[in-house]
Amino acid sequence: GAGVSQSPSNKVTEKGKDVELRCDPISGHTALYWYRQSLGQGLEFLIYFQGNSAPDKSGLPSDRFSAERTGGSVSTLTIQRTQQEDSAVYLCASSLEGVRVLPEKLFFGSGTQLSVL
Amino acid sequence: AQKITQTQPGMFVQEKEAVTLDCTYDTSDPSYGLFWYKQPSSGEMIFLIYQGSYDQQNATEGRYSLNFQKARKSANLVISASQLGDSAMYFCAMRGVETSGSRLTFGEGTQLTVNP
């Protein structure tokens, strides 16, 4: 597709369950980012992938959060043992060059709305 | 550490008028970039405009312009000739070249409503 695709668009889960969120970046984009947006708040950085380099995981809030990017393309964000405070919109973005270029223009997906009951 | 402050949680403007959305920032990084994004109700973040800290001129992109005052650490977004489709959440963001690594720091946003 032409843009960043995220699935599912909505996810409702029970506290304690694991969830997987998927991001399909724009073809050819070397950089991929995950951000989290809580209700009425700005975006909070989670993790950044650039090519084959080690990811920048410095924004992950706890060890229950992990992400991987397979083959330099699709990425999966996994939240284990979900808690109610994990409820938020999870946004994925990709860019052509990543942080090697300033400005890097990020293209965002529409996000996954995660609700933990 | 970096911080973005958007002091206007909500703004209203009449169609066809201009509006300024405020953004102030704080950083110790000597080189940085400032960004504005628009988030309509669909949820997707849309890049609007970029200003580099060493750029001599204020950035412009169509109806969007950035009023960059480096000494005051402000990067206000000006939207001219507002349209109904401009109603959305607007976020100011920045990234420092040396200190931010890969992260953009976002403000809490301003909800703009354009009235007919």
Image (cartoon, rainbow, N blue to C red):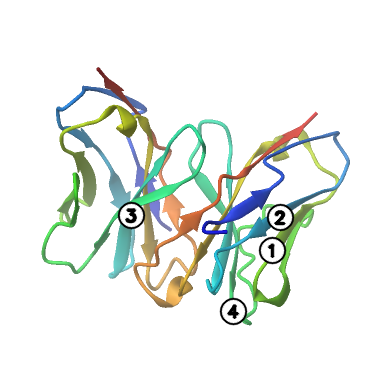
B92 to B51, vertically: above or below = above
How packed is label 3: few (under 14 Cα within 10 Å), some, or many (20 or more)?
many
Q: Residues within 10 Å of mark 2 (few under 14, many from 20)?
A: many
The relative height of residue A81 versus residue A25 in the rendered view (above or below) is: above
Q: Are the two marked residues, 3 and 1, in contact with CB atoms closer than 8 angstroms? A: no
Image x and y of residue A89, in percent:
62, 40
Label 1 element class: strand
What residue did someone put label 4 on?
A51
Residue at 45%, 75% (x, y): give it: A97
Q: Position of residue B102 (x, y in %)?
A: 50, 67
Q: Residue furthest top?
A: B116
Q: Amino acid at mark 4?
A: Gly
The picture quadrant where one finds residue B27 is bottom left
Which chain's residue wears label 4? A
Q: Residue furthest right?
A: A16
Residues B86 and A116: in front is: B86
Question: Left or right of A62: which side holds A97?
Answer: left
Residue at mark 2: A22
Residue position marked by numbered label 3 in the rendering: B35
**Dot placed on the residue nearer the N-terminal end, 2 or 4:** 2
Amino acid type, mark 2: Arg
Say if mark 2 contacts mark 4, CB within 8 Å.
no
Q: Earlier in the sequence, mark 1 or mark 4?
A: 4
